[in-house]
Amino acid sequence: MNFLDRNEFNFTPSQEVIDTIRNFDIGKFCFYTRIYDEGKKSIFSVWLSEKFGIPENQILLGYGAEDLLKNAVHYFLTQGDNNRMMIPKFSWWYYKSIADEVDGETLQYPVLETDDSFCYDLDGLKEMIERVHPRILLLATPNNPTGNGLTPQEIGDVMKMVADDTVVLVDEAYASFVTTETEYIKTLTEQYPNIIICRTLSKFYGLPGLRMGFGFSGKSTLMDKFARYANKYLGYDRLSEEVAIAAMKSDEHYRKIADVMDEARKMYTEELGCLPGFKVYRSSANFILIKYPLEKKGDLQKAFVSEQYKVKFMNEPDLNQHMRITLGRSQQNRKVCDIILSVCKQ
């Protein structure tokens, strides 16, 4: 079975990752990753601090980005009497789920469809922020499943919309597909004490099974308290942290994979975008969203099952005649396109 419904990795890890695992010194498991005499959280947080130019005490580590998101939502929605969180209208179901776990109130802000994509309605967002005054404003950029995102300038514009006591939680799980530029993270965390930016090794670096996420927070007493709540006192495990560093050092390998995904986006757009009733949305992530004629749904589902391919058929209000397809290897992408074309010729 070819799983192109989970936004997981269908490629091979970098040679640096493979070598790190093969050559790992088991004796390192005898020691914590925390650097006691320097007051550092772990070898990975130190490496991230040096790479991004952000103080180590503003680095957050998690069991994947979902762990950071969950910790942040649970922490901030239970501090004081404001338990409101705003999330995009079309977004990952997990956001609402973790707010529900602490009886948080989740409200959806507008996401608008454009000619070839989706976008955040920044005017509508501003009006809603002023009306709702959320404790947490969650920005997913790029957003799952729509694939749209915000530029660093737009994130800064949103930061100016919120009150000082609103925490802006930025989920950048797919951001490395968009750009290699990261200097804006340092700028945003220096300018805004109420921001948290979350990233992961699961998407661009293709290591969801590693369960390693990281983030950056603004500098404030509140964020210091959150960091003590969220970070593991003794760090994570030596192997995971060393593999994470190896992956992030081998950017060239993953950029080549991103190029394969870019070719797939072009193929889907050119070959399916011209079909009656189809629409291929512009995406900046490792998946693409495609709208299809609803009457074709049953035939498409049967065709994918018969060819042992799985894609995600969306089933939510205003997004119920759409497929989200993970961008895989070239032959997988070609096969998916051919399956859809074969159904349309029937």
Image (cartoon, rainbow, N blue to C red):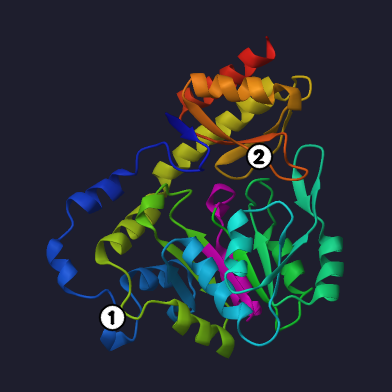
Residue 309: image x %, image y %?
49, 27
Left or right: residue 198 compared with residue 136: left
Residue drawn at x 50%, y 32% is 260
Q: CA distance from mark 2 to mark 1?
A: 46 Å
The mark closer to the camera, 2 or 1, is 2
Confirm whether residue 195 shows in the render.
yes
The answer to which of 194 and 55 lies nearer the viewer is 194
310 versus 150 height, above or below: above
Residue drawn at x 74%, y 23% is 295
Left or right: residue 277 compared with residue 267: right
In the image, what residue type sits under mark 2?
Answer: Met
Mark 2 and 1 residues: CB-CB less than 8 Å, in contact? no
Is 99 a magenta residue? no
Residue furthest bottom as drawn: 221
Residue drawn at x 37%, y 73% is 46
Neighbours of disc 2 within 10 Å: few (<14), some (14-19), many (20+)? some
Q: Which residue is mark 2?
A: 314
Q: Which residue is mark 1?
A: 35
Q: Write down the quadrant of residue 316 in the picture.
A: top right
The answer to which of 257 and 333 lies nearer the viewer is 333
Residue 87: image x %, image y %?
70, 62
Left or right: residue 295 compared with residue 30: right
The answer to which of 131 and 215 lies nearer the viewer is 131
In the image, what residue type sits under mark 1?
Answer: Ile
Q: Which residues are magenta?
A: 174-198
